[in-house]
Image (cartoon, helix red, strand yellow):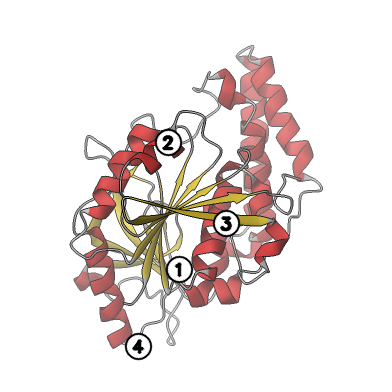
Amino acid sequence: MKNVTAVILTFNRKELLQQCLDAVYAQTRPCDSIIVVDNASTDGTREMLLADDHPRLAIFTLPRNIGASGGFNAGFRLAYQQGAEYLWVMDDDVIPQPDALQHLEEAEALLAGKGIDRAFLLSKAVTENGSVTNTPAVSTLGNKIGYQSWPQVLEYGLIPVRRATFVSILLHRAILERHGLPISAMFIWGEDTEFTMRVTRDKPGFMVGKSQVTHLRQESGPISILTNNSPGRLELYRHHIRNKIFIAKKYRHYQKYYVLQEFFKITGLFFKLIGLGETKKASIVLQGMIESINFYPGQESADAPTELADINRLEYKRNTTIKSLIVIHDTAQREN
């Protein structure tokens, strides 16, 4: 593999980001370059990054928080347009084992040698206590004689998948050329699900069992409005509900009655919250359902001119290391 660029998205978690960067720099297969997209942090993230010498690092800061969807959209786009052949993408709370990228590279070579097409490669994610998290969906694509092909390379610790998260995912630039970028209008929750389902319609991704990362802060389990009482995050759950319905509508061919199943699950959640007296949470769920009616966002091309995002680049030297500070005025990526 040539020219691997790590893309890390961060927002107000500079201590976690530092752990993530330390782990990326400790890889047995070094990255050729590293991009950090700072989603308008206010906790001193930018100052922390510029205080020390980080080789091969470019820092991208956004003028305001445009959500994980907008942040990953920017990171994918900029890595692609800077010439990255492979993108290794993760959030700032992902801590790769030292050989995580090496095992992804070995899996890429093995699959290429066998002539097996792949949309992406994915690391196994565990929590601090070793529980499996961010479990992908196994691909149900069939082989030429009509059987599901997921056991094809099982002896090598590789499992084909069709839905995954941006928790240590490696993909070739050709995937972006063909399928475009994550949908920035989704804002938060689900952009990784939609993107990975989009790119695996005719070929699977592969989970690489030997490549492992620790996903911090995941012991609380999957996203749930039932258990989350954080005032700052509750309002965001309307995006989660809206995006789940959007994905079900867009990919309804993947599963029989997919849209109906999601609708009944979300409706059941709404009435459960009413029964618990959680009227504010119930109204957020209802708002997400209403917004989903006319929510059909488009996707952006990876080679769209950067001028459309009004990107300005500033460079300066410090201790012989070129530091890059790129400010993205997201006029083309505002939430719908």
Location of mark 4 (residue): 115
* Distance between the alpha carbons at the discs numbered 4 and 2: 46 Å
Mark 3: secondary structure: strand
Ranked by sequence position, the earlier of labels 4 and 2 is: 2
Say if 123 sits above or below 144 in the image.
above
In the picture, the disc for residue 47 is 2
Give the left or right position of residue 244, taking residue 18 as reference.
right
Q: Secondary structure at mark 2?
A: helix
> Please, what is the three-letter code of the amino acid marked with disc 3?
Arg
Mark 2–mark 3 distance (CA, rounded to whole Å):
17 Å
Q: Nearer the viewer, residue 136 or 180?
A: 180
Measured from the top left, where is residue 24 in percent x and y? Answer: 28, 53
Q: Amino acid at mark 1?
A: Thr
Given the image, on which type of amino acid does mark 2 rest?
A: Glu
Q: Earlier in the sequence, mark 4 or mark 3?
A: 4
Q: Residues within 10 Å of mark 2 (few under 14, many from 20)?
A: few
Circle 3 residue: 313
